[in-house]
Image: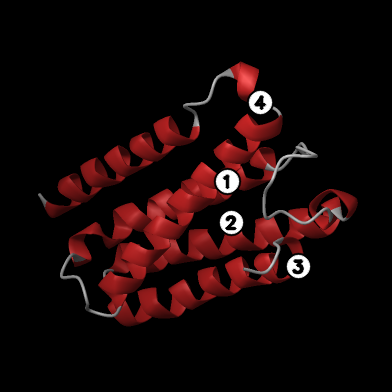
Amino acid sequence: MKNWRNSLVAAGAIAVTMVAAGSFSAAESTGEGLIKYRQSVMGALGAHMGAISRIVRGEADHPDQLLAHAQAVQALAMMIPEAFADNAEGAENEAKPEIWSDAAGFAAKAEALQTAAADFVAAAETGDMAAAGAALGGVGGACKGCHDNYREAD
């Protein structure tokens, strides 16, 4: 029964994320609309990471929802390369131009996040919070590795 509920929660989380990320029209595929789309994807990723962190640290008693969050992170990680495929020059954002001038490096960082997210899903599937916490460190490291090189400092 619990696995069925986890699958339902995961499917719902992924569906909501996909709808939110895809809610912009084709007319907004450049400039400000593109930036807002990217910010939605990255904001959703950050929100799931925040929830995951609280679950793993025991601050939120929702271990049954860890897998759903992990799967959402994995789905969002898969969206990043396409979300940043085109530069929206002139629109205010935190993306460094190196994303496009060093496309191979950015692609490698995105792939590292995708791999870390897949490892995290596998750890979350076990239900072992220590293993999940260790795998979460890999996801956080992949995020930081990309932000250090390709995001303007806050």
Real-space Cα separation, disc 4 to disc 1, in angstroms: 18 Å
> Residue 143 at x, y = what percent?
59, 66
Q: Mark 4 — residue?
A: 29
> Residue 1 at x, y = what percent?
10, 49
Circle 2: is it few (<14), some (14-19), or many (20+) Cα within 10 Å? many
The secondary structure type at the circle numbered 3 is helix
Q: Which mark is residue 114?
A: 2
| Type of amino acid under label 2 | Gln
| Type of amino acid under label 1 | Met
Q: Quadrant of residue 67?
A: bottom left
Q: Which mark is residue 78?
A: 1
Discs 4, 1 touching: Cβ within 8 Å: no
| Type of amino acid under label 3 | Asn
> Residue 60 at x, y = what percent?
20, 71
Real-space Cα separation, disc 1 to disc 3, in angstroms: 19 Å
Circle 1: is it few (<14), some (14-19), or many (20+) Cα within 10 Å? some
Discs 2, 3 touching: Cβ within 8 Å: no
The secondary structure type at the circle numbered 2 is helix
Q: Earlier in the sequence, mark 3 or mark 4?
A: 4
> Residue 104 at x, y = what percent?
84, 54
Toward the viewer: 31 or 99? 31
Real-space Cα separation, disc 1 to disc 2, in angstroms: 6 Å
Circle 4: is it few (<14), some (14-19), or many (20+) Cα within 10 Å? some
Discs 1, 2 touching: Cβ within 8 Å: yes
Q: Earlier in the sequence, mark 4 or mark 1?
A: 4
Q: Earlier in the sequence, mark 1 or mark 2?
A: 1
Task: Identify the residue shown where x is 39% and y is 69%.
Answer: 123
Q: Mark 3 — residue?
A: 149
